[in-house]
Image (cartoon, helix red, strand yellow):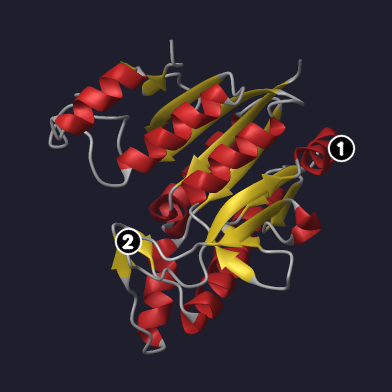
Amino acid sequence: MEKLTVIKVGGKIVEEEDTLQRLLDDFTAIEGHKVLVHGGGRSATKLAARLGIESQMVNGRRITDADMLQIVTMVYGGLVNKNIVAGLQARGVNALGLTGADMDVIRSAKRPLKDGVDYGFVGDVRQVDGSRLSSLIRQGIVPVMAPLTHDGEGHILNTNADTIAGETAKGLAPFFDVALVFCFEKKGVLRDENDEDSVIPTLTPEDFRRYVADGTIQGGMIPKLENSFEALKAGVSQVVITSAAALGSGSGTRILQYK
């Protein structure tokens, strides 16, 4: 089976010019089929503030009311996505920017009230059309996925980028030998957040439960790792969490399958 790499990069990396250019160079150097999934939350927060719209977060997740939905659609689907696509085209990569609504590749359902919190126009992924995506990829096109989906009834929904990456990898697993790589600012999952070199080289579900219980792993890393284990269960062949600077080096934290 042909290999395919799904790379997810955090907003901080694609929103700052020097880290964006390095990422685009490193991503271009990856051989074979590939997909890039990006965030963009800091840019959305900045633009919202300039327009006098307050950003509300609950447990690291953005509350997306009608005004904020307009902001994230413009920023994620427009500004951030097209900057990446243009940068890749300049490097000879035939990139195509997509939201979940484009070609109906990712459909979601609006998140119901959760613990009394109304997240607004936030989507929980229901289906990924891996067949359509794989046909694009086999034509030599590199999808660049923005963290936006749709509900099939005309509504765009803000959707967590880690989830988009995990669900896209799962959707493509029947068609390719898929590796999923989460890139962020750290070198991997750390034992000590103040020590950049305390990378945990491998992480099993048992390790994960233990590290969550003792507070070593917390915050946004928890859903990232939950997505990682779910992806492995659904047929993704490998998952790595590493820094964008180490992309392609093989370093970072390798997530291991349930026994």
Q: Going 30% across and 64% down the picture, which residue do you hit? A: 58
36, 204: nearer the viewer: 204
10 sits left or right of 102 in the view:
left
Residue extending furthest toward the top? 259
User: Looking at the image, do the residues carrying marks 2 and 1 touch, with CB atoms under 8 Å apart?
Assistant: no
Residue 19 x/y as whole percent:
42, 48
Quadrant position of residue 148: bottom right
- Of residues 108 and 237, the one drawn nearer to the viewer in this rendering: 108
What residue type is disc 1 on? Answer: Gln
Label 2 sits on residue: 115
Quarter the N terminus occupies: top right
Number of the label disc, if any, that sits on residue 139: 1
Mark 2 is on which residue type? Asp
Task: For marks 2 and 1, give the one nearer the viewer.
Answer: 2
Rendering quarter of residue 79: bottom right
Q: CA distance from mark 2 to mark 1?
A: 44 Å
Q: In front here: 109 or 26?
A: 109
Residue 213 can be seen, yes or no = yes
Q: Secondary structure at mark 1?
A: loop
Q: Position of residue 171 (x, y in %)?
A: 68, 36
Residue at (62% x, 34% y) in the render: 169
**Relative to 109, residue 248 above or below:** above
* Label disc, if present, on residue 35 of the rendered structure: none
- For the residue labelled by badge 2, is the local secondary structure a helix, a strand or a loop? loop
Residue at screen point 41% across, 80% down: 48
Residue 196 visible in image: no
Tell me which numbered mark, 2 or 1, is placed earlier along the sequence: 2
Q: Is residue 209 above or below residue 99?
A: above
Percent coordinates x, y for residue 34 in the rendering: 67, 34
Residue 240, given in percent of the width and then of the height, sits at: 45, 25
Instruction: Tell whether 65 sits left or right of 145.
Output: left
